[in-house]
Amino acid sequence: MLNGSEVSKGIGIGIAKVISSPESGVMSNDEFTAAISGMKPGAVLVTSFLTPYMVGVLKDYSIAGLVCETGGMASHSALAAKSMGIPTVYDVYGATEEIHDGDTVIVDGIGGYVYERPDPDIVAVYSDKRKKYLADLEDLKSYRNLKTVMADGTEAVIMCNASDILSVMHAIDEGGEGIGLFRTENLLSGEGRIPDEEEQTRVYSRIASAMKGKEVIVRTLDIGGDKSIPFLELEKEDNPFLGYRGVRYSLGHRDVFTTQLRAILRASAGGNLSIMIPMVTCVEEMRNIKSLIHEIKTDLRDEGFDFNDDIKVGATIETPSAAIIADMLAHECDFFSIGTNDLVQYVMSADRGNSRVAYLQSVTQPSILRMIKQTIDAARSAGIDISICGEAASDPEVIPIIAGFGCRKFSVNPRSVSEVRRTLSEWTTADAEKLASDILKIPVDQEIKEYLHKIYKDRKS
Ligand code: PEP
Ligand code: MG
């Protein structure tokens, strides 16, 4: 049995297709596509590394499971794998050596285990687990079109994270109550060039009209870090996650940024759109952006375009600086959305894509929990909207803590909507608040995890 990080839930059983790294250590997209051609439906892909692009290619193959030796559970490639709903385990050291082509493999995306050539009794145990998991998925379907209400009647909202029209449709099918994070990196890079203002306006308008008046938060381009757009030819950086990323790139490339902001504003004439700025670290950035938006509005007005003059402009709270000055930033923002994927990376100083430091990438680290609470408190005292859009928002053991801190808006992968809704329906506000305050007293991540795990198990039994 091999251990790793659970990325996408479910139990997959299939025959292994193993792809090892080439000697150069780096596999190009074309080499990857060639390596998996001919892979049979129902296979379990075992590979040394995956980029978000490579995960996208896998959509054309009905694989039963995915095992990756590296990655980090909050990397963008892991998030892409999660959105496909295939049982997936990352950070499985030695998988491409231990597992051989043609082996039977079990992928336990719930516990983060991979079994190579399992004994028949393990196969029997996992066939049973798989049946239970599928039965639970059936049960969850009944939550799809319900309102989100906690056990004491407190209302909450489950929105979805999306990155293209298809995922927006998926969000609607799964009962999402809005789009709490529309990532625009795919949209802006898909055609091998930045789409012009008319093209972007059409896409944002389409998403807004598909959501029929429900809120859609469009995040402006968050290039950099582990997300590159090759045709933009960004300079190579030694520390890309600490470099020219998100709002920093946008403020340095007014042409690209203005085109995107004009398109979002124009689309806001016919839909409930908001603008969210990624990687904010200081008040100056928000002030610069607000004055740019003010200028753009004046131009649009002069040119005779309609737009929503009251469009909300907010920040992703995903850097330690933003969380620490959340009370100050709240004066400059109409809303906050907490991006725990990056917040964990930056607060713990642990690259979200580096498996060696995966043990530090935990949202239940006391420092992270304090920052989440502080951000929620700052937003509530300033009377601005607060939501959470990082992966932690869909973790059933963490959701009650976030609710206990006072956050009522969650934005999650469309596949997680029903589970988050069910989890919230099982907690009263008072119980969630008690849990949140108890958890804040525990100084060790592992102890917090064990405590949460026990509570989760006791409540389920
Ligand atoms: C985050 O950082 O938590 C987030 C939601 O954004 P992304 O994963 O795209 O960086
Ligand atoms: Mg982020």
Image (cartoon, helix red, strand yellow):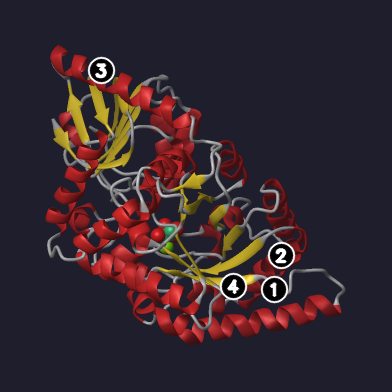
Disc 4/disc 3 C-alpha distance (Å) = 48 Å
Number of other residues with Cα within 10 Å of mark 4, as a class: few under 14, some 14 to 19, many 20 or more: many
Number of other residues with Cα within 10 Å of mark 3, as a class: few under 14, some 14 to 19, many 20 or more: few
Q: Name the residue under label 2.
A: 263
Q: Specify the amino acid type for callout 2.
A: Ala
As drawn, the residue found furthest toward the front would be: 152
Q: Specify the amino acid type for callout 3.
A: Asp
Q: Which residue is drawn at 56% across and 40% down?
A: 175
- Mark drawn on residue 452: none
Q: What element carries label 1?
A: loop
Q: Name the residue under label 4.
A: 313
Disc 4/disc 1 C-alpha distance (Å) = 9 Å
Q: Earlier in the sequence, mark 1 or mark 3?
A: 3
Q: Residue at x 46, y 27 (%)?
A: 61
Q: Specify the amino acid type for callout 1.
A: Asp
Q: Which mark's residue is nearer the viewer, 4 or 1?
A: 1
Q: Specify the amino acid type for callout 4.
A: Val
Q: Are marks 2 and 1 in contact (CB under 8 Å)?
A: no
Q: As displayed, is residue 445 above or below residue 333? A: above
Q: Which residue is drawn at 85% across and 80% down?
A: 302
Q: Mark 1 points at which residue?
A: 310
**Can you give x and y, in whole percent of width and height, for residue 104 in the image?**
24, 18
- Mark drawn on residue 128: 3
- Quadrant in which the N terminus appears: top left
Q: Which mark's residue is nearer the viewer, 4 or 2?
A: 4
Q: Identify which residue, 195 or 363, lies in the foreground.
A: 363
